[in-house]
Amino acid sequence: MQQGELFIWTDVNPDFEQDFNQWYDKEHMEERASIPGFLWSRRYRSVHGKRPYLALYRTVGLDVFTSEPYLNIFNNQTDWSRQCFERMMHTKRRVMAVEPLGGEGTGSHLGLLELDSSNKLSKAQQLTDFLSGSTGVLSHRVLMPDAELSTPLPSESREDAGLNPILIIECTDESTASLIVRKCAHELGLEMQNTQVFNLLWELRSQDLA
């Protein structure tokens, strides 16, 4: 079964940033990781870019997002969740199908490249040998958005609404991630504004909640 990944890339109103982080760390990460079919929750932060926060949630399959346990929580958000959703800005919420391309493992830093055409997707898949042979690159994958399941959050604007594939590159350190992202962007003909490097804040594995 092809695994799924919930992808939330966002900024937040700076007046409520501390509360936003508390919400993720004290409520939201555990709430999502506890849903049957979820495997882990991860939070990332970047010091650069329009959207400094990234949250990823892996599931055993896309059908988790249409399951009764998930829909019960999704359709009955906590008061704290509703407040934080309203305070988020420039958000991209996507339900993705995971296409592993090479390697294994989770790095301390993550390179993100937003692709904008099927041509760039095929080129990204052709970068597998380069990425697999690069020192400091642990693994890489493409996330393919599901149009039906990618319900936008209130803070998503029309300009943010494109359903583009995302290339994710797991790296051991920031300098490697930055270098690899620049090289891949050049090979793919991407503007650097469509890329970002994040550091891992923390991970919560669903099995740890048992």
Image (cartoon, rainbow, N blue to C red):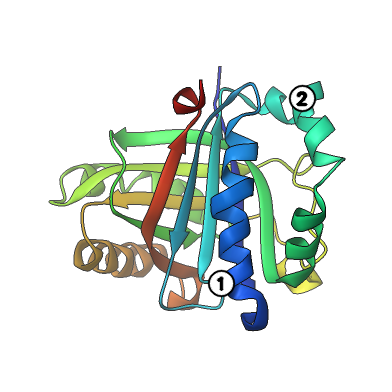
Q: Can residue 165 be seen from the camera position used here?
A: no
**Residue at position x 37%, y 55% in the image:** 200
Residue 78 position in % (x across, y down): 80, 48
Q: Compared with residue 37, is residue 140 higher up or lower down, i.e. above or below?
A: below
**Residue at position x 61%, y 22% in the image:** 37
Residues 84 and 93: in front is 84
Please tell me in which quadrant of the rendered image residue 149 appears.
Answer: top right
User: Would you say 160 lies left or right of 138 here?
Assistant: right
Q: Residues within 10 Å of mark 2 (few under 14, many from 20)?
A: some
Badge 2 marks a residue whose secondary structure is helix
- Checking the image for residue 36, the label placed there is none
Q: Can residue 146 be seen from the camera position used here?
A: yes
Residue 1 position in % (x across, y down): 56, 16
Residue located farthest toward the left when viewing the structure as drawn? 135
Which residue does the numbered mark 1 point to in the structure image?
51
**Residue at position x 65%, y 38% in the image:** 31
Q: Residues within 10 Å of mark 1 (few under 14, many from 20)?
A: many
Q: Nearer the viewer, mark 1 or mark 2?
A: 2
Q: Compared with residue 55, is residue 139 higher up or lower down, i.e. above or below?
A: above
Task: Specify the amino acid type for callout 1.
Answer: Arg
Residue 147 position in % (x across, y down): 76, 44
**Residue at position x 31%, y 42% in the image:** 106
Task: Specify the amino acid type for callout 2.
Answer: Pro
Instruction: Kindly report the distance in space between the C-alpha atoms of the residues bearing marks 1 and 2.
Output: 29 Å
Which residue does the numbered mark 2 point to in the structure image?
69
Badge 1 marks a residue whose secondary structure is loop
**Cβ atoms under marks 1 and 2 closer than 8 Å:** no
Residue 153 position in % (x across, y down): 78, 58
Please tell me in which quadrant of the rendered image residue 129 appears.
Answer: top left
Residue located farthest toward the top when viewing the structure as drawn? 1
